[in-house]
Image (tube, rainbow, N blue to C red):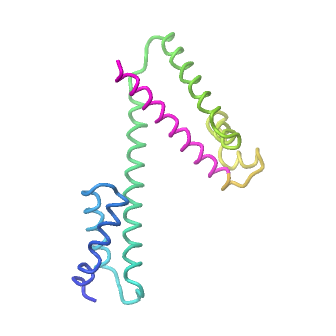
């Protein structure tokens, strides 16, 4: 199969696959282009199923872009939080810290018990994942998955609180 035939045969399938994952036309086009560049440059002589092979390339490319985007966003947020001006009023700073701590405790209390335990051990007691697994006698993989699940639940709760706050502000 020639490069042109490969492209013509799979261009729509790859594009729609990328579009579904990326949820953005420009990103899907960019990733799609990268997929075909890699597919054309690769040695296809040993490939038995071209469709699954090229879809695997597309899947990996989409995952890489999404992972880099997520990492970049987290770096931006971290940089913003570290660079924001600090309050010079110790009373105001103390009050803000106490309010934040109270809100975090409320969110922690909404987590399921097993997940809450891992999240608190990690972020309040500052234990590592291996230490957490030893403390509560679970495999490290279980500790990691509970920690990941806890962070996702906390994120979902924070997003819903922000939406509630925004909707209540728009009423006034």
**Which sits in the foreground, 89 or 18?**
18
**Residue 88, image quadrant:** top left
Q: Is residue 122 above or below residue 146?
A: above
Q: Which residues are magenta?
A: 143-172
The residue closer to the viewer here, 163 or 94, is 163
Residue 64: x %, y % from top left: 40, 60
Q: Quadrant of the N terminus?
A: bottom left
Quarter of the image that includes the C terminus:
top left
Whether residue 131 is situated above or below residue 8 in the rendered picture: above
Q: Nearer the viewer, residue 87 or 9?
A: 9
Specify whether residue 83 is painted magenta: no
Q: Is residue 59 left or right of residue 115?
A: left
137 vs 10, left or right, is: right
Q: Tell me which corner region of the image, top left, top right, bottom left or bottom right, holds residue 111.
A: top right
Which residue of the protein is positioned furthest toward the left in this rendering? 4
Q: Say which residue appears at 54% left-offset and 44% top-offset.
A: 152
Q: Which residue corresponds to the image point at 54% horizontal and 19% vertical from the top-left? A: 99
Residue 169 rendering spot, x and y as whole percentages: 37, 22
Q: Please name the residue shown 35% across and 85% down the image.
A: 44
* 145 within the magenta span: yes
x and y percentages locating residue 19 in the rendered image: 31, 61
Q: Residue at x 34, y 24 (%)?
A: 170
Magenta part, dominant SS: helix
User: In terms of depth relative to the viewer, which is nearer, 15 or 83?
Assistant: 15
User: Residue 110 location, x and y as percent?
Assistant: 62, 34
- Judged left or right of residue 104, residue 10 is left
Q: Is residue 69 above or below residue 16?
A: above
């Amino acid at each position: 199969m020639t490069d042109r035939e490969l492209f013509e045969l799979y261009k729509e399938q790859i594009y729609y696959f990328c579009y579904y994952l990326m949820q953005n036309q420009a990103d899907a086009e960019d990733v799609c282009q990268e997929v075909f560049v890699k597919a054309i440059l690769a040695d296809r002589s040993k490939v038995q199923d071209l469709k699954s092979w090229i879809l695997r390339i597309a899947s990996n490319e989409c995952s890489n872009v999404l992972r880099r985007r997520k990492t970049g966003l987290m770096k931006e947020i971290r940089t913003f939080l570290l660079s924001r001006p600090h309050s010079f009023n110790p009373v105001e700073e103390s009050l803000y810290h106490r309010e934040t701590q109270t809100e975090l405790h409320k969110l922690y209390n909404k987590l399921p018990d097993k997940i809450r335990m891992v999240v608190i051990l990690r972020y309040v007691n500052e234990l590592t994942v291996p230490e957490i697994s030893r403390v509560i006698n679970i495999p490290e993989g279980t500790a990691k998955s509970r920690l990941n699940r806890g962070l996702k639940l906390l994120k979902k709760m924070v997003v819903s609180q922000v939406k509630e706050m925004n909707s209540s502000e728009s009423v006034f």
